[in-house]
Image: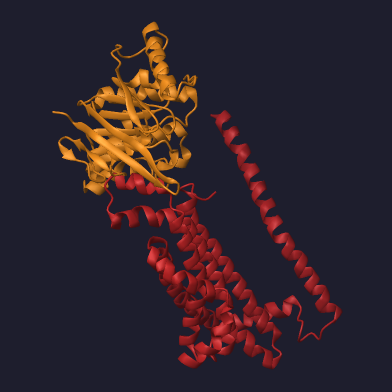
Chain colours: A red, B orange
Amino acid sequence: MSDAAAVVGRPDARVGRQTWRTAWRNTFPFLVVAALWEIVAWLGVFPRQLFPPIEDIAARFVSLTASGILEHHTVDTVLRLLAGFGLAAVFGVAIGVAMGRSRRAEDILLPLISIVAPIPGLAYAPLFLLWFGLGNLPSILLVGFVSAFPVIFNSWTGVKAVKEIWLRSAQAMGADDRRLFRQVILPGALPYILTGLRLGLAQAWRILIAVEMLAAVPWGLGWLIFGARKFLDTDAMMSGIVIIALLGLALEKFVFKKIEDYTVVRWGMVK
Amino acid sequence: MVPIEISGVTLTYDTPSGKVPGVKDISVAIKPSEFVCIVGPSGCGKSTLLNMIAGFLTPAEGEIRIDGKKVDGHGLDRGMVFQDFAQLFPWRTALGNVCFGLEMKGVPKDEREKIAREQLRLVKLEKFCSSYPHHMSGGMQQRVAIARALAYNPSVLLMDEPFAALDALTRDDMQRLLADVWRETRKTVIYVTHNVSEAVYLADRVLVMSPHPGTVKIDLPVTLPRPRDPLSIEFIEHQKILLDHLGHAAGGGAQTQHA
């Protein structure tokens, strides 16, 4: 009994120390940057209004949050992001998989997509604004359009990379086309599809923040940051940027990481 | 009744440098529950023949009948085990993999899991039902593959060098296990290998194939009592006979493939 307790007890302490060390290693670079920021702010290289010290930003962050303004901006941005990225995910996976499965779809779509994909998404923004007016619609559509490309490319590659032997085994066991697709091709292509979705989401963020600055939306983090420049309100700008960073981190850690751990990592398809 | 009847089967491959004969005019009849090994040098068409029986390839001439029914594409009357460990679906547990064929057949969940557990017990993996393939050794994965091919109860088991990528010790274990599984299930087995001692250990009958074009050179029955002792004189005699034939099959070159 006591032996077992000793054996269990010691690694526990070690694990605890390990966690602290990891936490420290992760926060250390932030502390360095924060310290540098403070030094530059207090040296007065820029006027305080243009380069506020962290305590000013924090105070503004708290007051903006307390008044509900920051939340409103955040919710609007997140809704647009989800709508746009949702479109990209659905259509991107569908198109990519179709290209991977059908020679004809590949022949028709690949040249088109290869030409359109490398164009920076923001280049389409004025067109979308002219076609769809101002506000939510052009923003969401542009986000969907631009972030669909990495999803398409990776889904296409993923379907092509599905191992021949899986298909053969499944066919030998009597899988018809529909079940071959659902039970073999989709899970087989999943590591690539998830990579595509992750890249697509990063793309969606970039284009959304930019287009919010142009589309005259009444609320949104991009608009908060852009609008604040008129009042030299750098505290509000920084607050918006912090929220974007936190949201990006949360999506990565609590959505993508979790999905991956539950699927492709658990299956040993991705180390 | 003859469960497998291969009559006058010919297949040529179209390559950029012209037609290459794969197999030519092969006729073989296989009895129920017979364990047939096909051996031969690389390129003799043994895998081609197996793939035609499996329905992955269609013969240009001749036909293959299983239980009187002409082979046309895949069918649940045949189970297939490949050499590649990657044949298992990594996103399914051992149990999920074994269930696959039953799922395609429309067997209800409870029943197929019961059958799958039974099959995994047969290959001595009942403790690993919920393990994913990447947590298993190569030998274990091949055992799951055998259980998976047997689960939907095909009358014929087709095996394409299933143990060739395993280390020698594991391979010996697997051969013993397969012999046990075969004794218990009484399936007809067609087993492709280039390992002569494996063929003598497992087979009721060994077909030696020779290349250019692929034909069955001799058809050698192995009547040694089971379980077989690979160190017995008779076993080694059989190996020697096969190696002699293979030596000729490979074009007179000395065949030095020992297990």
Residue B198 appears anywhere in the view: yes
Q: Residue at 43% of width from left, 38% of height from top? A: B84
Q: Position of residue B82 (x, y in %)?
A: 38, 37
Left or right, residue A20 beside residue A172: right
User: Residue B127's image quarter?
Assistant: top left
Left or right, residue B241 beside residue A72: left
- Give above or below for A226 relative to A157: below
Q: Residue at 33% of width from left, 39% of height from top? A: B51
Q: Position of residue A239 (x, y in %)?
A: 64, 79
User: Residue A37's image quarter?
Assistant: bottom right
- Give above or below for B124 relative to A27: above
- Give above or below for B233 relative to A160: above
Report the number of discs: 0
Q: Position of residue B88 (x, y in %)?
A: 39, 42
The residue positioned farthest toward the top in the image shown: B233
Q: Residue at 38% of width from left, 55% of height from top? A: A185
Q: Position of residue B139 (x, y in %)?
A: 44, 31
Nearer to me, B30 or B165: B30
Nearer to me, A261 or B212: B212
Left or right, residue A248 beside residue B195: right
The residue positioned farthest toward the front in the image shown: B18
Q: Residue at 44% of width from left, 73% of height from top? A: A86
Residue A68 appears anywhere in the view: no
User: Residue B154's image quarter?
Assistant: top left
